[in-house]
Image (spheres, rainbow, N blue to C red):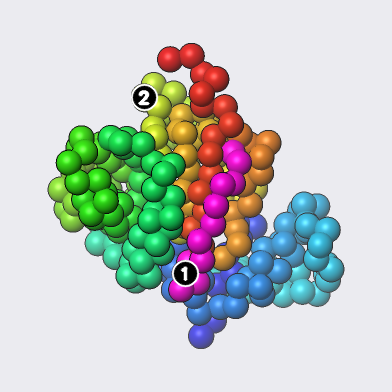
């Protein structure tokens, strides 16, 4: 099987959101995580942004980028076609994702307020929302009803059909552009199998905007990325690794300084 390396070197901005939600999802678990990270850093080096910790090799860069370009030309269709596929999206890794989230939330319960106002960003068909909802029902019996919102510009139909609630159409670019500025502060933003797809500059813009609108951020990822730096307004509090799914908890450094 041809390996699909997970970096954004050849992607148009609007296509980042959907890569893990469609054709490239299985490849993350089929490929080796360390090789995957070297590929992404090699592509970054080609733009003058490589991490100093990796020895850069021009032949490796050329081979990796050419492979990714071939994958894209073979498999990535127009945005309208991707959006239509989103209506029937199913995450093949839902069982392990749900297990990892439940284990992490059990450990982090003291950090979560009640009632909880949460946003599942890049929500897919609702796998993370349903996992969070099930955990809340188990652990917060008798508490006030939580407010669970979701957003995904591609899979909102699949989410609404499965979960039975409205889904915002917000993209990462919308978040970076400030779409949440008019929304009340969220206690928690949850993002699974998506943020690691963003090119570095867009990741910085997106998580910086989130740091102003949420107290906590939970990120589920199939490998070590994304690297969310303190300068973006987030401090990592904890991490859980289960079945090759990493779940990280971040605390906003700025949200409590914002005037309501």
Q: Position of residue 197 (x, y in %)?
A: 54, 56
Q: Which residue is mark 1?
A: 242
- Displayed quadrant of residue 70: bottom right
Mark earlier in primary sequence (2, 1): 2
Q: Position of residue 171 (x, y in %)?
A: 42, 41
The numbered disc on residue 184 is 2
Q: Is residue 91 left or right of residue 88?
A: right
Q: Main secondary structure of the magenta part?
A: strand
Name the element at disc 2.
Answer: loop
Report if residue 152 is visible in the image. yes
Residue segment shown in magenta: 234-245
Residue that appears at 36% across and 36% down: 113
Q: Is residue 115 left or right of residue 249?
A: left
Residue that appears at 36% across and 24% down: 184
Task: Answer above or below: position of 45 versus 254.
Answer: below
Residues 246 and 109: in front is 109
Residue that appears at 80% across and 66% down: 54
The numbered disc on residue 74 is none
Query: Which class describes the residues within 10 Å of circle 1: few (<14), some (14-19), or many (20+)?
Result: some
Q: Is residue 238 magenta?
A: yes
Report if residue 194 is visible in the image. no
Task: Answer above or below: position of 217 versus 130.
Answer: above
Task: Answer above or below: position of 123 versus 70.
Answer: above
Q: Is residue 5 left or right of residue 100?
A: right
Task: Answer above or below: position of 200 versus 86.
Answer: above
């Amino acid at each position: 099987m041809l390996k699909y390396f997970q970096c954004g070197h050849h992607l148009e901005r609007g296509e980042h959101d959907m890569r893990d939600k469609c054709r490239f999802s299985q490849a993350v678990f089929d490929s080796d995580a360390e090789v995957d990270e070297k590929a992404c850093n090699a592509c970054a080096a080609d733009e003058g942004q490589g991490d100093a910790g990796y020895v850069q090799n021009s032949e490796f860069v050329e081979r990796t980028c050419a492979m990714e370009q071939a994958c894209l030309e073979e498999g990535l269709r127009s945005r309208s076609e991707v959006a239509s596929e989103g209506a029937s999206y199913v995450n093949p890794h839902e069982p392990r994702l749900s297990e990892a989230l439940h284990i992490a939330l059990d450990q982090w319960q003291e950090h979560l307020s009640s009632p909880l106002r949460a946003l599942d960003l890049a929500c897919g068909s609702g796998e993370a929302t349903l996992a969070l909802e099930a955990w809340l029902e188990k652990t917060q019996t008798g508490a006030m009803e939580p407010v669970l919102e979701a957003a995904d510009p591609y899979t909102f139909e699949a989410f609404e059909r499965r979960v039975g609630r409205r889904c915002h159409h917000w993209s990462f670019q919308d978040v970076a552009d400030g779409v949440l500025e008019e929304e009340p502060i969220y206690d928690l933003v949850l993002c699974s199998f998506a943020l690691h797809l963003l090119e570095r500059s867009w990741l910085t813009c997106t998580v910086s905007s989130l740091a102003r609108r949420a107290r906590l951020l939970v990120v589920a990822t199939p490998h070590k990325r994304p690297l969310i730096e303190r300068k973006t307004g987030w401090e990592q509090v904890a991490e859980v690794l289960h079945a090759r799914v990493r779940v990280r908890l971040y605390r906003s450094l700025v949200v409590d300084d914002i005037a309501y």
